[in-house]
Amino acid sequence: MTLATDMIQHAKEVRQRLMYPANAVADKGIDLHPKQIPVEDEVLEHPIIRVFIREIVKIPNRPDGRVAFSNITHEVSNYYGVLIEDMMSRERTARITMARHVAMYLARKHTNPRLSYPAIGMRFNRDHTAVLNAIWKIEELVLINQEIVADIRELESRLLCPHEPDHCGSTVAPVA
């Protein structure tokens, strides 16, 4: 039971670090150094525990309608059925690459303040040119592939209106 309590506490601390990054106000009293919990790998690989931890770490959308980067990666990961770690890795299979490109596209379009290309690249362990290429690729696919348009609309409705996806107006448009 202590192990589960430690994992929940760690997930809450990670959520706090995501909400108040290192450049935020220093007097919040938040420990910005990552915590390591000694846990057996088979415990973390259990699918129920992974989903549980993902739901705890998820942060609410901002009042201005913009979305947190971690929410984008979580939703894209769940939608395409790939692990976040795989999206951040150097893996180049078609499914993982598509998920990574869509996540980069959505991160550029919906984060606030709008993340720069180098900032997005740093979070995906890529440089800014890889992010530019990914966004251009998605913008080209949106013009010719209705499946991609449907995928992006569904992801935007999940991100922007998590409780009422039918009433959410998502628009698939080029990123400026």
Image (tube, grey):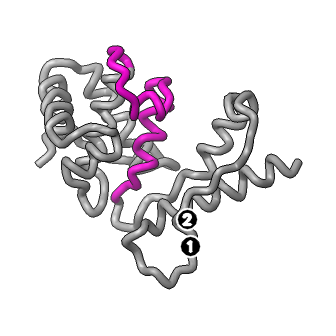
Residue 127 in percent (x, y) is at 21, 40
Amino acid under disc 1: Ile
Q: Residue furthest top?
A: 93
Q: Is residue 27 left or right of residue 108?
A: right
Residue hosting label 1: 30
Q: Are marks 1 and 2 in contact (CB under 8 Å)?
A: yes
**Magenta-drawn segment:** 66-95
Which of the labelled discs sits on residue 7, or is there none? Answer: none
Which quadrant of the structure image shows residue 152?
top left
- Front of the two marks 1 and 2: 1
Packing grade of label 1 (10 A; few <14, some 14-19, many >=20) is: some
Q: Is residue 56 left or right of residue 86?
A: right
Pick whichever of labels 1 and 2 is earlier in the sequence.
2
Residue 6 in percent (x, y) is at 76, 54
Q: Nearer the viewer, residue 142 or 93?
A: 93
Which of the labelled discs sits on residue 16, or is there none? Answer: 2
Residue 100 in percent (x, y) is at 33, 31
Amino acid under disc 2: Gln
Does residue 122 sit above or below 152 in this rendering? below
- Could you give the CA–CA distance between mark 1 and mark 2, rounded to whole angstroms? 7 Å
Q: Residue furthest bottom?
A: 27
Q: Residue at x 28, y 39 (%)?
A: 104
Q: Residue at x 30, y 46 (%)?
A: 122
- Is 50 magenta? The answer is no
Q: Nearer the viewer, residue 10 or 166?
A: 10
Does residue 23 sit above or below 119 in this rendering? below
Q: Nearer the viewer, residue 145 or 83?
A: 83
